[in-house]
Image (cartoon, rainbow, N blue to C red):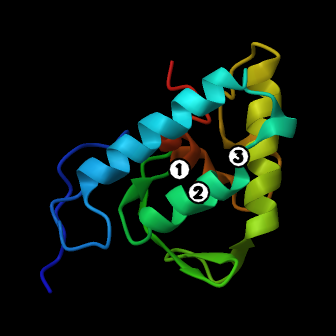
Amino acid sequence: MTNPTITQKPDSAVCADEKNSINSKDREQAVTAFADLLQQLDYRPEDLPEQQLWELILSFEHEPFFTFKGLEFRYSIRGNEMFIDRKEKSITRSTIRMAAEKALEIRHRGEMVSGPKKLGTFGASYLYPIFQSFGLISRK
């Protein structure tokens, strides 16, 4: 298998390798649908569509992301844990849910999630750019 090449800078998790279980066009449509759903739910944290979030996370497994500081990383999923290639510890599904709820809580109040520290959870440096890609966190 060839190494995927990055086609865009940190705002994108798209790569040239189309041999993934879900192609980039399908992932893009899933992200758009998820972002639209969040908007319809007025970003209320209590209405977080957790299963759709987890499915998105699964569909972007092994894709390149970039931290707030520009460091590239990828993740893999084993059970209900996310393993970042730059770390030894995993981020649990419940931690991901809590961070997503926190991001929605901040957005629902009309505020910006200005950086990873605002999420207040372990692994926030990695979850922040993933959440940006999924529309949980605004890029503005």
The quadrant the N terminus occupies is bottom left
Q: Residue drawn 36% across and 42% down?
A: 29
Pointer 2 and pointer 1: residues touching (CB < 8 Å)? Answer: yes
Asked where in the image residue 87 lies, by quadrant, the reply is bottom right
Compared across the picture, whether 64 is left or right of 78 comes to left
In the picture, residue 109 is in which quadrant?
top right
- Residue 44 at what x, y percent from top left? 80, 28
Locate residue 47, reporting x and y percent: 80, 37
Q: Is residue 67 visible?
A: yes
Disc 2 marks which residue?
126
Query: Does residue 124 appear left or right of residue 94 in this picture?
Result: left
Q: Earlier in the sequence, mark 3 or mark 2?
A: 3
Bin the neighbour count of mark 2 within 10 Å (Cα to Cα): few under 14, some 14-19, many 20 and up.
many
Given the image, on which type of amino acid does mark 3 rest?
Answer: Pro
Quick one: SS at disc 1? helix
Residue in the image at 28% along x and 43% along y = 9
Q: Residue at x 73, y 58 (%)?
A: 96
Give the mark nearest the N terminus, 3 or 1: 3
How many angstroms separate mark 2 from mark 1 (CA)?
7 Å
**Residue 15 against residue 132 in the figure, above or below:** below
Viewer-side residue, 36 vs 126: 36
Residue 136 in the image: above or below residue 138:
below
Which amino acid, by three-letter code, is at mark 1? Ile
- Label for residue 130? 1
Closer to the camera: disc 3 or disc 1?
3
Q: How many marks?
A: 3
Q: CA distance from mark 3 to mark 2?
A: 20 Å
Q: Is residue 131 left or right of residue 65?
A: right
Q: Residue furthest top?
A: 110
Is residue 13 something one can see in this rendering? no
Residue linked to disc 3: 49
Vertical arrangement, residue 130 with respect to residue 21, above or below: above
